[in-house]
Image (cartoon, rainbow, N blue to C red):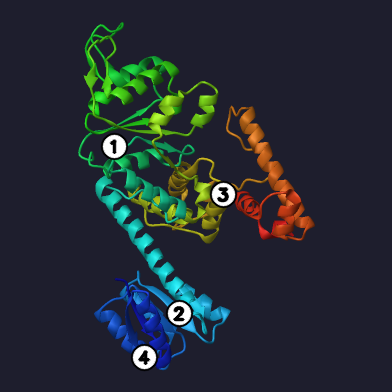
Amino acid sequence: MSSVLVIDDKESMRSMLSQTLSDEGYEVSTAPNGPAGLELARDKGFDVVLTDLKMPNMDGIEVLRSVKEMDVDTAVIVMTAFGTVENAVEAMRQGAYDFISKPFQPDHLSVLVQKALENKRLQAENSLLREELAHNLGFSDIIGTNEKMKEVSRLISKVANSDTSVLITGESGVGKELFARAVHSLSPRRDKPYVTINCAAIPPELLENELFGSERGAFTGAVARKIGKFEIAESGTIFLDEIGDMELPLQSKLLRALQERTIERLGGSKPINVNVRVVAATNADLTDLITKKLFREDLYYRLSVFPIQIPALRERRDDIPALAEYFLEKYCREMNKAAKSFARDSLKLLEKYHWPGNVRELENTIERAVILAEGKKITPDHLAIRLQRSEEIQLRDGAGLKDIAAHAQRVAERGTIIRVLKQVRGNKRKCAKTLKIDYTTLFDKIKKYSITPEEML
């Protein structure tokens, strides 16, 4: 049962809140002032604290600070009949979960308490998963409090205990192998082998030999039996990175291995039973490859029983500061350099940059900055990145017509949205109506294209 502490100097308010929350199934304690409430909190501890702002001897902000010093995870909701914007800002800055003005409907408060408890539960789950990952993997490189990353963590924790095949998708550099390793390390197979193979890094004519092995004399140069990765990974997990680059003939043999749980070495005739969990990853659009007859549809469905999409770094910009700090500490330690910090302009630049190379590019950028920086601060000059201008075409070398068309569409959409927003003086609903799209679609595109308020007017 969740516990709630109500601190208010008015007995009628304490009584009403106690009755309302008790009826909702919470264990409720009350206190007439801040010192009495803090004494209860020290003795017992509470999931949620509701405190009035204006009280004699000790106001609600002081109560908030003291509660957070005792237990940073306690959710504190500040109540007041004299609510101002300044009060609300100060309360939130001090770590309050929310700020509510009197008078309020009891139902409104009940919903607020419920949301505070749910938020606390999600934070605890994320923290627990991070601790479990750190314990099993030996490091805590999976960093992120972004909602998309929380969902990825929840999916990994759910699928890990099964033998289900997992397909991890996402752009290059998002850390797909890190998540694949997490699936293995949180599974009952954690003490068994974890074997990785990059399907794009090995020539097609050699990949089958790497996966399934070969018998002596199977081909020129095969002077001894070779054990393949599937046999090496027996009872454990095999990670097939860049599965979209596998040639069609080998895809058929992989499908057979997954369906029958047997393999045959090159030059061999005896089926070999294998008990291996498969986790695959790709930055390619496999459905597009299926349409082009470059990837087997039946293999796709066999691999993607449980798909997990890793978001690009630009889709989780709120995680950039934490990631940057992590890499800064890591490389200062590895290079035996004195601790450094980011200049304010540096952090702003990191948060605004479009990161086409995702987390890998961020890590490389911070590593280079640590090498270059002589003093205690990482400045924008050390980062050696520049913001993308909307009129620039920045495509990777060798980009095809599809990439160019997609880029042109993004530039055209962004320009059109800005033009119409200016015409309607920033009125998003009028803009959506003019463009014949939903308001939510317009809102998503404004966020996607990083259109600033200044550009709308």
For label 4, the crowd category at 10 Å Cα-Cα, with few meaning under 14, some 14 to 19 and many 20 or more, is some
Query: Is tag 1's residue or tag 4's residue first in the polypeptide sequence?
Result: 4
* Residue at 50% over, 78% down: 100
Which residue in the structure is indicated by mark 2? 78
Query: Is tag 3's residue or tag 4's residue first in the polypeptide sequence?
Result: 4
Which residue in the structure is indicated by mark 4? 32
For label 3, the crowd category at 10 Å Cα-Cα, with few meaning under 14, some 14 to 19 and many 20 or more, is some
- Is label 2 or label 1 in front? 1
Name the disc covering residue 163, or none.
Answer: 1
View extreme (front): residue? 23
Q: CA distance from mark 2 to mark 3?
A: 37 Å
Looking at the rendered structure, the secondary structure element under dot 3 is loop
Q: Nearer the viewer, residue 379 or 441?
A: 441
Name the disc covering residue 240, or none.
Answer: none
The disc labelled 4 sits on which kind of residue? Pro
Looking at the rendered structure, the secondary structure element under dot 2 is strand
One can see residue 243 in this view:
no
Name the disc covering residue 353, or none.
Answer: 3
Residue 119: percent from left, percent from top? 41, 64
Locate residue 410 relative to residue 256 in the image: left or right: right
Locate residue 64 relative to residue 230 in the image: left or right: right
For label 2, the crowd category at 10 Å Cα-Cα, with few meaning under 14, some 14 to 19 and many 20 or more, is many
Looking at the rendered structure, the secondary structure element under dot 1 is loop
